[in-house]
Amino acid sequence: MKGNLILEDGTIFQGESFGAEKSITGETVFSTGMLGYPEAITDPSYIGQILIATYPIMGSYGVANSKNWESDGIKISALIVSQYIDTPSHFQSEMSLGEWLKKEGVPGLIITDTRLLAQKLRDKGTLLGKIEFTKKIDFYNPDSDNLVAQVSTKKIVEIAGKDGKWKNKTIMMIDCGAKRNIIKCLNKRGVKLIIVPWNYNPFTEKTPINFDAILISNGPGNPKMADKTIITIKEILKRKIPILGICLGNQLLALAAGGETKKLKFGHRSQNQPCILVGGKRCYITTQNHGFYVSKIPDGFKNWFINANDGTSEGLMHKKYPFMSVQFHPEAMPGPEDTEWIFDFFLERAFIN
């Protein structure tokens, strides 16, 4: 069946369906990642977005068991590819990419010239889009909603750490749309995790939670919409509790500390974003998925990392206290594991220095 991708500037691309044949709308973005599509499209940070994969071949190794995903299912609104492989070959594959999309009710379109689509978004910036089959629909801007509330956990979850160096320490993770590998990275270091909803404030609850440090997870959308999380972080800063922010968590920490955020022209979505460690010449290759960035560094903080492509801030470090954050994903999945040391660095700063 044929379907149309319609952009808000009036451009129309016709494509062939390989997913669910239903009309949807959202923000049109692109990722330059070469692999890892099951992990990427289950990242909650993609909710509300029509994802264009610029790598020309998708689906070649199928879809593995759900234990390898980064959430409980597909989070993108739709997927657009240049060439779809319907005959996957991999020993872990349990279904094809197209079967998965249909099963979860997510549209997929084959539009040959995805490079032209990416060039348009780079030139004009991120555009709203919609995929229409038979039903006509209106455009929708996901930034107008609190997307964090849609993907955050609805209940408190405790996860015991494995036997490790930090087995006697507890981290409370504010779940703004966390990827599963963040949990795995901390779990294997022995940390006990208490995962709480985005709007949970441990200082006002009748039944307090005992914890030693805070992690603010990744998540989707405009950080300013997560107002209750920002209020909680402000209180955490006052009490000087160690903090690590990841992706959206970096932006929320900045806002809580008095900084500012803005929207990037077309975002950072790939597994090859180069980030330079400030104060040296070392460059790390990182996985990223975000549309906003920290445009003003709050007082008392300094840049920890800088993006080598566009010079934007890629992380914050407090000059005195163990408050730190990164805009990229140190847990990767998919992508390089160059920066998993961030977890060890944080734990050392939080509990020893």
Image (spheres, rainbow, N blue to C red):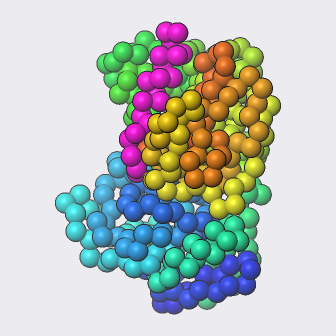
Question: At 33% from the left edge and 23% from the top edge, which residue is drawn?
Answer: 162
Residue located 53% across and 70% down the image: 52
Task: Tell me, yes or no, whether the highlighted magenta stretch contains residue 54.
Answer: no
Which x, y percent locates residue 311? 64, 47
Q: Is residue 258 left or right of residue 88?
A: right
Q: How many marks?
A: 0
**Percent position (x, y) of residue 87?**
26, 76
Residue situated furthest left in the rendering = 91
Point out the stretch of residues depicted in magenta. Answer: 334-353
| Residue 66 location (% of width, % of height) | 36, 53
* Quarter of image, res 246: top right
Q: Residue at x 65, y 33 (%)?
A: 303
Q: Is residue 190 above or below residue 274?
A: above
Q: In the shown orientation, is residue 341 left or right of residue 252?
A: left
- Nearest the viewer among 128 and 138 is 128
Q: Is residue 270 visible?
A: yes
